[in-house]
Image: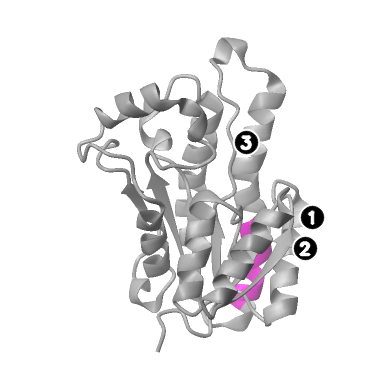
């Protein structure tokens, strides 16, 4: 039997990058996956098509999860389509990098709302149907190594990603008695839309700081998500696990 057979997963920000890799990995293990996207319907449908081509089941749902009502509608769409939600992966994220002295209020608000408020919005919506079903659940929140070590020019991003850690540990204590686990993954440097703007010189310099001497590959995060989403990880909750080549230690 597949690792996640019979499970339904919602992955936010799943039309590209780490989110896409996670969605495809979960589907490959038998989960029915809701591909959430905000702006790019074509990219989301491409993920759906790739999953279906490999024999999986998926559907794309548009929602700006930084908005409370939109997040509620996303989870409702998942339960209306598949009858349940077992796995929630909060991956949606953005950056507005600049030094604090130059940072505008909207640059702070956009990052906090997209990266952190979205986690509150989606968890708030998903926990109740998970509890009502009485079959447990898995919540996996994607933070960043920046939450652990900081980064100049990213006070907004670091604050949002560090907030995810505190939120997740607290929620894990609240709902552990319902067999719902909550864990955090803190990726390091990976090739995504958020890092492609760094340029080759910055990429090469960053590799010098990473003990393993390279950037990560997207499946290396997805593999961990599929494990944490499975019954094999039933006794793991409230944990922060880094996938960063050692840069954050």
Q: Residues within 10 Å of mark 2 (few under 14, many from 20)?
A: some
Rendered view: 187 above or below 45: above
The residue segment tinted magenta is 122-131
Q: In the displayed structure, does residue 38 sit left or right of residue 173?
A: right
The quadrant holding residue 25 is bottom left
Q: Quadrant of the N terminus?
A: bottom left
- At 53% from the left and 85% from the top, the residue drawn is 6
Q: Residues within 10 Å of mark 3 (few under 14, many from 20)?
A: many
- Residue 75 seen by the camera: yes
Badge 1 is on which residue?
69
Separation (CA) of disc 3 from disc 2: 21 Å
Badge 2 is on which residue?
73
Q: Name the residue at the front extreme.
A: 53
**Residue 3 place in picture, x, y as percent:** 40, 80
Separation (CA) of disc 2 from disc 1: 6 Å
Badge 3 is on which residue?
112
**Residue 122 place in picture, x, y as percent:** 65, 57
Rendered view: 50 above or below 66: below
């Amino acid at each position: 039997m597949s690792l996640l057979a019979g499970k339904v997963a919602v992955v936010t920000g799943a039309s590209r990058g780490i989110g896409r890799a996670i969605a495809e990995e979960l589907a490959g293990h038998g989960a029915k996956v809701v591909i959430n996207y905000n702006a790019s319907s074509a990219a989301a449908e491409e993920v759906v098509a790739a999953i279906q081509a490999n024999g999986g089941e998926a559907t794309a749902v548009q929602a700006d999860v930084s908005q409370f009502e939109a997040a509620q509608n996303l989870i409702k769409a998942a339960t209306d389509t598949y009858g349940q939600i077992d796995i929630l992966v909060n991956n949606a994220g953005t950056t507005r990098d600049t030094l604090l002295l130059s940072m505008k209020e909207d640059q702070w608000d956009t990052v906090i709302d997209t990266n952190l408020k979205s986690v509150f919005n989606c968890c708030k919506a998903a926990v109740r149907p998970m509890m009502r079903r009485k079959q447990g659940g898995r919540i996996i929140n994607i933070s960043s190594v920046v939450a652990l070590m900081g980064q100049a020019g990213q006070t907004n991003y670091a604050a949002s990603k560090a907030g995810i850690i505190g939120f997740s540990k607290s929620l894990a204590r609240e709902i552990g008695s319902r067999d719902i686990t909550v864990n955090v993954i803190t990726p390091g440097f990976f090739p995504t839309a958020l890092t492609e703007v760094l340029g080759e010189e910055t990429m090469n310099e960053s590799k010098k700081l990473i003990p393993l001497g390279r950037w990560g590959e997207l499946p290396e995060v997805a593999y961990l998500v599929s494990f944490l989403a499975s019954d094999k990880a039933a006794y793991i909750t409230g944990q922060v696990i880094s996938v960063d080549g050692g840069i954050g230690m």
